[in-house]
Amino acid sequence: SSSNQLRLTFCTPTHALCASTFATVVFMFRLTSILVLALAAGLEDCENSDVGSLLQTDAKPAHALSVTSSEAKKKGHGLVQSETPAAPVSLLDRAVAAWLEIASSIQLNRRGLVKDTNDEAEVESPKLMQMVADITYHNPTDLAWMTMIPCIIIGCTITAILGTFVMQAVQPKKEEPVPVQEVAAVKGMTPVQMLFNMVQNIVGEGMLSLPAGIAGGTGLMMGSLIAFFFCSLMGYTFSIMGRTCYATGEKTHKDCAAKVAGPGLAQTMAVVLMLKTVFTCLTYAIVIGESFSRIMEFFGVEGIMATSQGTLITICVFILLPLCLQRDLSVLSYTSMIGCVGQVWVVLSMQIRYLDGSYREGGEFYSMIPAKDVPDFSGGGVLYWKTSAATFVLLGSLATAFIAHYNAPKFYSQLQDATPEKFNKVVAGAFGFSMIIYFWIMCVGYLTFGKASEGLILNNYSEKDSLVTTARIAMGFAVTFGFPLGFTGLRDATMSVFGMSQDKFVPLTMGLLSFIITGACFFHDLGLANSLGGAIFGALITLVFPAMLLYYTGNYRGITEFSPAETKVGSFIILALGISLMAFGSTLVIITKYFPEVIGKK
């Protein structure tokens, strides 16, 4: 029982002193954390000054969580509910009151900790358990202040990047003589242009499935740590691809692998890249069709133009085809900049709806959404550190969310005056910016809808919500402008697999685009597409193949770009992570989709 688990019995004074010191340190740390939480709580007045109301700004009443005297007597605890003092007025008074009340409830004294009396154990154990329950329970609105942090960071970052971009555009350039043999060469991208293209290529539609990954059975803080780990890992493996191009002097995955490992691995990589980019373009097309069909419905359009198929085909003809026919990535940096701004607007709109409570009970749009989309925080409120078997589903989504590795050699080859150091700086900036966006949307999406978060989070919002409609428009254009980057990887991989020349550029573009659009008209499950694709092909491209290239390139004679530690230890760790993610993640994605009862889902 809980009382037996919390009961401490010591046989010697030394043991008692050590245990008392340890317990006191733990309790003081807990009290310090509580005081910080109290100071960080909202500025709204509380109805009561007990722990629940002092630490929550819009939470359930304390009596909904506390153990009342009648309930305690039924359970045999014999607790008596204490009287609730008047609520302090100022925030500092509330914090001090919280400190004093919790300190009094815990009763920090060595005698109570080391004395093995049944009466005290039966009384103090439920008190301590109730205190833990009161402290750890949080309403989604408690973290409103935290979700503003990435908002501020992204705002400042975008301002700095746009300012740099504008200054570079208006600054007069020095005319330098250009050698005759370089006149026909590709112009290349500046670091800022490459940054926009990379962020647009990385973020894409994958961010819309992340709140569902958190809601599937992973705590918010644990999910954020996993996202940080994946960001660092994926950024490192992306850097490996660029450094491999520098070390080998090649410009494609297949050519790099062929030089250091032979034709077998080279052809395998090309085929997998082609299959993965088909999957990537398919998910892009799904989001485009779903987003613009809802937009058409909002404006009262009916008929075939209000369907996802009709809107997708129309956008393909007038927007996607002209963009996909572009050969130079520097041309796409301007549309990528617009796409990045659109992605930020999507999350900012979600942030506004989270703060104004439009989708909480009694909110403006609460009654306008179906029952399956109603916010659900059952089972203890917001979960922070929980992990479960379904956490592998989130890993699969994150593997897709950070993938842009199929374009890594092309990014490096088209970077002006490319060096590994210059390339790594842009990679760090792009992946760091993407991580902040992911952390932001995970927090806002999950804290708004909880367990009801859908695989495409914008589907949770009411179609009558004009603000979210603008977010759907922004997301639609963001994905539309990101589609050519993914399609470039598909076309290059296809030409590499079949050994096609540049003469087939236009007909191949037409054929592949028709194939993708047709497939998107029949496939509509974005969550499964992201998770399953990330678990299988994403793990291969982002982890397994970079690990193999790292190993073979590091051991290739005459190449000193990679250290012995990277070559032997780093490659083995990355390879093991990739195989694990591919095996466990893909299995659990299928189980979650078709056999949810196996992992405790309904």
Image: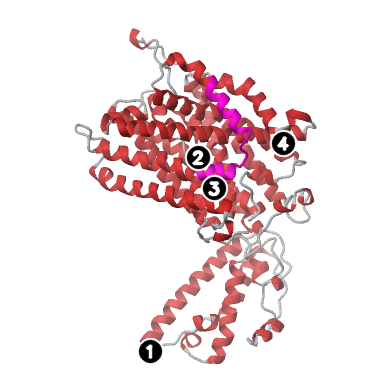
As shown in the figure, which amino acid type bears the numbered disc 1?
A: Pro
Q: Name the mark on residue 294.
A: 4
Q: Name the mark on residue 433.
A: 2
In the rendered image, is residue 338 in sight?
Answer: no
Q: Which residue has dot 3 on it? A: 439
In this rendering, the answer to whether 286 lies above or below 515 is below
* Mark 1 or 3, nearer chain start: 1
Q: What span is colored magenta in the figure?
A: 510-532
Q: State the residue at coordinates (59%, 49%).
A: 211
Q: 101 or 533, which is in the foreground?
A: 533
Foreground tag (1 vs 2):
2
* Element marked by disc 2: helix
* Quadrant location of the C terminus in the rendered image: bottom right
- Residue 291 image position (x, y, % from top left): 67, 35
Q: Quadrant of residue 323?
A: top right
- Residue 348 image position (x, y, % from top left): 64, 42
* Element marked by disc 4: helix
As shown in the figure, which amino acid type bears the numbered disc 3?
A: Phe
Q: CA distance from mark 1 to mark 3?
A: 49 Å
Q: CA distance from mark 4 to mark 2?
A: 29 Å
* Mark 3 or 4, nearer chain start: 4
* Element marked by disc 3: helix
As shown in the figure, which amino acid type bears the numbered disc 4?
A: Arg
* Mark 3 or 2, nearer chain start: 2
